[in-house]
Image (cartoon, coloured by chain):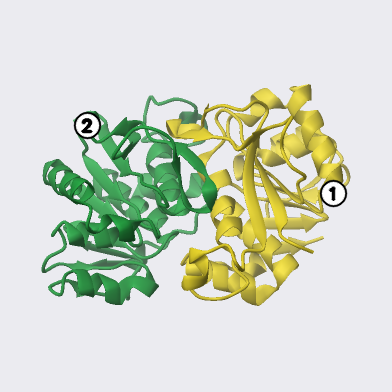
Chain colours: A green, B yellow
Amino acid sequence: MGRRNVGILLFEDVEVLDFAGPYEVFSRTRLEPGVESRRSEDSAPFDVFTVAAEPGELRVTGGLRVVPDYGFATAPVIDVLLVPGGFGTRALLEDDTVVDWIRVRAAEAERVTSVCTGALLLASAGLLANRRATTHWAALDLLADVDASIDVTGEARVVEDDIVTSAGVSAGIDMALTVVERLHGRAVAEETARYMEYRWLPEGVLDD
Amino acid sequence: MGRRNVGILLFEDVEVLDFAGPYEVFSRTRLEPGVESRRSEDSAPFDVFTVAAEPGELRVTGGLRVVPDYGFATAPVIDVLLVPGGFGTRALLEDDTVVDWIRVRAAEAERVTSVCTGALLLASAGLLANRRATTHWAALDLLADVDASIDVTGEARVVEDDIVTSAGVSAGIDMALTVVERLHGRAVAEETARYMEYRWLPEGVLDD
């Protein structure tokens, strides 16, 4: 297949690093190793874009101003769906527009992932039912409250049970590297971590 | 003193995580521990904003669309100046508007910091002369080329020699946590790392 589309959900008060860490990983992965290969898209296996309910500038945590590439109505097909977290998730748990969009796009996607309290949104969409999953350490109980059938664990930074969830904030980098590994192999993922000078410990992954 | 202003330089093709990692750290630091304290700015010791030469939307690496809070002409006083890196730095090394702005703002700032190849811009402004400094592993030679008086080291993720430089991309998170530690103590920095679920190893710091 050609490049996979990575669609990253944005919303008001999404946590900065929740989406920016995986954005870095997916947008800077190259099948050709080295630094120079990052100067072009020639060996880039992913097209990364951001999507929000409506087009137009958003404020993420801390006030950073970000403009999504697409609104829900115009977003291209998504192969890897990424739902980040942050305090902004709470307001969205009962937002049918957002939860329904996640459910529809997840059904079409090859991989569905979350960072931090993004798992709450996946849970609200029913996507984590009877699965093992994780979230930020402070939201583990809340995740079980959203759907009691979830086998919530705080034992790993990344949990794979078809859907890939991760612990808080910076663990999204590990989650993205794990997805890169599954799709393109350990060497490509490790080389991307090296480019980013990120101390990746793949053994932090808990398989179901 | 009151809150310190953290001014983060943005430019076309700045590396996403170079600025977003420290943005997360500084904007989410709280003097009051816990998750709830992050819901307000009450115990926030930093005001974080972004600055670019001109106002208006920028494309950072991978295509993320970001809107700076200020242009050079209107940016408030900066206490902690942060210069990120990325392929976009190369075009700026000879850009007097940018290099002069860095020099002027650095002279007024309490702390001057860089991530990754942001060190090249500090060097171009003459700020690293006769200092120990670091940058991305692939740019160590280039840093010495910009200013041969720099004691370039690739031995640590963070190097403090009055000015604080860091290794590539994700090492900016370590750099920011180091600055938080210097200004507010180890406990506040560690608690911020814990909130972010970031594996911070403060011993990665090389003091001059």
Q: Secondary structure at mark 1?
A: loop
Question: Where B139 sits versus B78, above or below?
Answer: above
Using the image as rendered, state which of residue B40 and residue A35 is in the foreground.
B40
Q: Secondary structure at mark 2?
A: loop
Question: Where B60 sits versus B205, above or below?
Answer: above
Disc 1 marks a residue whose amino acid type is Arg
Determine if residue B86 is in view: yes
Q: Is residue A90 left or right of residue A21?
A: left
Question: Where A172 sits versus A159, above or below?
Answer: above
Comparing marks 1 and 2, which lies closer to the viewer? 2
Disc 2 marks a residue whose amino acid type is Ala
Q: Is residue A203 left or right of residue B138?
A: left
Determine if residue B128 is in view: no
Q: Residue A124's mark?
A: none
At x 19%, y 60%, the residue is A124
Which residue is identified by label 2? A73
Quadrant of the drawing holding the C terminus of chain B: bottom right
Quadrant of the drawing holding the N terminus of chain B: bottom right
Which residue is identified by label 1? B131
At x 59%, y 47%, the residue is B168
**Residue B203, image x and y in percent?**
66, 69
Instruction: Report which quarter residue A54 is drawn in.
Output: top left
At x 72%, y 33%, the residue is B74
**Residue B142, image x and y in percent?**
70, 34
**Residue A207, image x and y in percent?**
22, 66
At x 53%, y 34%, the residue is B67
**Residue A170, image x and y in percent?**
45, 59
Using the image as rendered, state which of residue B139 and residue A52 is in the foreground.
A52
Callout 1 crowding tier (Cα within 10 Å): few <14, some 14–19, many ≥20 = some
